[in-house]
Amino acid sequence: MRHSLRGPVPPPRVDLVGRDEECDALVSALTSDAGSRLLHLHGDPGAGTSALAAEVARQAGECLRLPVHWLPVGAAAGILPPLPLLRLAAQLDVPRLRLASRWKHLTGTEVDSLDFAGDLVHSALRERPAVVVLDGIPNEKTGDILSQPFRRTRAVALFTSYEDWPLADEGLLSHGVRPLPEHAVRELFHRKWDQGPSYVYQLHEGCGGLPGFLPLARSARLSSDWIPPSRTGDLHYIAHRALEWRCGELLNLLEKSDRKEFDTRSLGPPVMRHLFAEPGERVEPLVAELLRVGLAHPLSPTRFRLVTDRPRIVRYTPPDQERYRYGPTRLARTPQRHRQPLLDAAHHQALGTAHAFDGIAGDNGDEPAPDLWEASLGLAESADDHLDLLALESDSWEPNTHELANLLARYFVRRGDHHRLAALHLVRTRALHLRAPAFPLSQSTAARQLGAPLPALRTLRKHRPFTQTFLELALCQRDLGDHINALRTVADGLREYPDTPALLSLKGELLTDQGRYEDAARALDTAITLHNREGGRHGLAVANLRRGRLGLLAPRAMDGRDTEQWLGTAQLGFEDSGDERGLAWTATALGRLNLTQETFDRALAAHRATEDVRGVAWTRYYSALALADSTARGPVGSRERRDAALLRLTEALELFKKLGDRLGQAWALHQLAVLLRERAAAEVRPGSAMDADLVEELRRLWDRAFQLFMTSGCLHGQAWTLLEQGLHLAVHDQDDPGRAHRLLTSADDLFADLGDTRGRAWTTYLLALVNSRIDRPAAPGPDPSFGPLLQRAMTSGPRVPEPAAHATPSHPVPPLRAVRDVLLPYPLGDDHEPPAPTASLDDSDRCRIVLDLLDDGPGIRLLLRVVPGPRHPWATGETPWLTATAAPRTAVSVEPVGATLRPSASPRHGAEFGLEPHRPGVHILRFTVAHADSGTVLQQVETEIELPESDRPHGRTGPVPHHAERT
């Protein structure tokens, strides 16, 4: 991901100067066999403690070959120590399910929460040791608490603080960090001045705190032999930024009064009331800090002179410093009444991000939604600051504070950061003294995402109904395979909140699962229109993914748009929003499109990374089907591929049972029976009967699948299972052909209700065979009356079955390998694995796609023809209209995108495409040939062609979705 809440990356440091010997000694002590693995670095602000810790951690990690994690402890660690531990658990990749299933451990006493968070970190470090830097520990008590999970592990821990204090662990090394000497400061300056004005700000980062050279800023105004005068304003700006809140306020008051000199005795009650919430506090410590950083000069014990230059401080403010950034110490010491502007800024940022995700308008309805990528990145960078703010405000939460917490909860769920969701839950339960989940909706979503939809459903039923509740309820019911109730919930939600795009989008997915493709297309198109109008970019990505999935099953519902375009648009939306789960599901859909195991393997890895058990189950299911269909490549290796497909399908079935997904179980059982039948057909000698036990096992599997389809409300699955059962009875129970007839008639009725022309074509063909057995005895030899029916079934289905020689009443009906929830191009293109050289294939009954580069006219033109073999039905019979669609995989424009043609060797029946390359060299084009009436994909091929660069001007092409290379 380009921006992530879980990145274990230490902050970059620049030009650590004058610390080589010190760093080597510390690294040696930490990495020696007899040395301690705990190190405490302490020093005054600006001494470079954090920079030294980062370099020591980096070198120790390289020496011990351990990953390095950097964790700013945060302003709220002193009052809520489990907070940084939960953030560290995110960096250590503690399994999310351990959090989502144990919220009760974070709603009890502080001791319970601390023990739970500490155990998570301790167990993770025992399994996978690492180097961890905990930067900015506020006090000795917090340091002692945070050091506990590192004991009795092989992990290395570095703690930084301003003060030295003896931790309880006697094995802890302690080292005081002193400011840089003047010669090191001079070297640092000389390295940076020649690199431009902006590099002055890296000086502050280079020492990881208030730079050691800042005390010299006062004398730099008088002696500028090694500091250019134009840079003194930069130094003052850095010093001003590093001041604590009250000290900065004192400086502002003094500068606004135009005083160059001031006396501490002249700072009367008005100034004191402005600076301090409690009476009796003293101003002398603030003046001492001004002296330390060089922004004030002593004239007497009580009289001082300011040495800052206010205009230059304003002039040198960089634009990227506008958003608030307060260090932990400053934030913790800021009075409560002065933290409200920070809370308002955090609320505005979170609301803007929600607007970018969902199209939720802010206070100003005319304000455009921010860029999704920038909004998500900004909130990811500020999330920990917002958590600290909420923890510090635990005594009094305003309405905006509650809304900020809810917005952060939804954001963490979408990003899959359940660890910070747990931290937020802990903050809210502490603030409101709750004994129940602090965010029922978001925490239910988290549980559902991690494979526990049933507990999530129980929690949601107690929640007050509103838009998100209806949506999450329906999603839980979908994950349980209960599409009947899921559609009812969506309908109830649309009655309460009409034209809600998220509900319409989910309705389209549920209708797709039922097989009502036309209705699904209308719902999804309406959702996409509403998302575009309201500006909900994340919801738009989800709708585009569902639209692409619909295209995989029903090409006729695509309105001429390529499935790859829908999936590519969805992929870009998920990347911009940082939704790793969405990217994983897009990868699964691309695997179904490309039918390559490498794509499925990448999708499986992505689902495992997000701990999405449901995603793993469905990806295994689809990869099993693609692997089973790859047996059509030839006899070489087909048995091994079929056995591997059975194993993956069985694994998917077990996962569906674990999740309680009835629809997934139904499809897995259905396809398991199909694969077992195919394996038996491949292994049984011609003319031999199938084993009686297997016949009974197949019947049992289809019966169970049909029952599950019934309870889940999937008409599509019911219809195909009835068809398979009718086929099974027609072949293996010929004593009662009427029973097979009844099952096929029921399947035909369901297909008619769904408007499924493919299913009706197959039932018409099979009913004709069954009726022939009922009406008259089987006759030997081919029966020409079945030719048109079989041809129609072949061109309507997602895959052409075996040759028409099987189409006789006396011959077993051809296996319906294509009756699956996946579209497979057939015959397979040249980009798939070719048969072994020893295998002989007869292509006389197949169609070939022929591409010719034309050179008899202007421009670059390509002719595509579909040439049937001499034994193919299209070689002598009536030929249907086909469509050919071009999809460039490289920078080349194709005109037109689609064309019609007829199967023929004649060029006048082919489809012609004009090519306009945007660069010279080799280009890749994919052509998809489909049946014009049914939209069934018949074949996909890719070709490489070397083209010169076109002389004609061309416009910029839009973003081309990146897909995995095909095998």
Image (cartoon, rainbow, N blue to C red):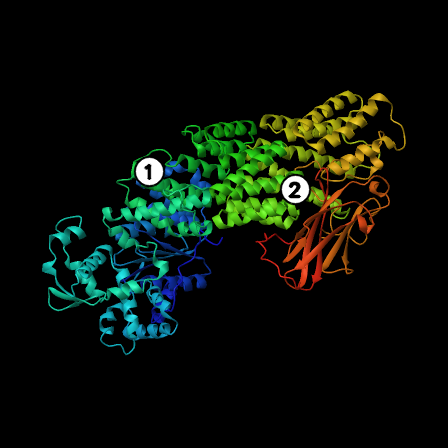
Looking at the rendering, which quadrant does residue 932 occupy?
top right
**Residue farthest to the right?**
780
Would you place residue 683 above or below residue 77 in this image? above
The amino acid on which the numbered mark 1 sits, given as a three-letter code, is Thr
Q: Nearer the viewer, residue 454 or 104?
A: 454
Q: Is residue 99 left or right of residue 613?
A: left
Residue drawn 45% across the image and 63% down it = 62
Would you place residue 214 above or below residue 120 in this image? below
Q: Is residue 694 left or right of residue 520?
A: right
Residue 609 pos. (x, y %)? 51, 47
Q: Is residue 847 visible?
A: yes
Q: Which residue is mark 1?
A: 429
Classed neighbour count for the residue bearing mark 2: other residues with Cα under 10 Å, few (<14), some (14–19), many (≥20): many
Spatial distance from mark 1 to mark 2, Cα to Cα? 45 Å
Q: Is residue 967 visible?
A: no
Residue 542 pos. (x, y %)? 53, 42
Q: Is residue 334 left or right of residue 379?
A: left
Residue 696 pos. (x, y %)? 72, 27
- Residue 819 is tagged as none
**Residue farthest to the left?**
265
Q: Are marks 1 and 2 in contact (CB under 8 Å)?
A: no
Q: Secondary structure at mark 1?
A: helix
Q: Earlier in the sequence, mark 1 or mark 2?
A: 1
Q: Nearer the viewer, residue 174 or 862?
A: 862
Q: Is residue 270 left or right of residue 874?
A: left
Residue drawn 23% across the image and 49% down it = 335
The amino acid on which the numbered mark 2 sits, given as a three-letter code, is Ala
Tally the marks. Answer: 2
Q: Secondary structure at mark 2?
A: helix
Q: Which residue is mark 2?
A: 624
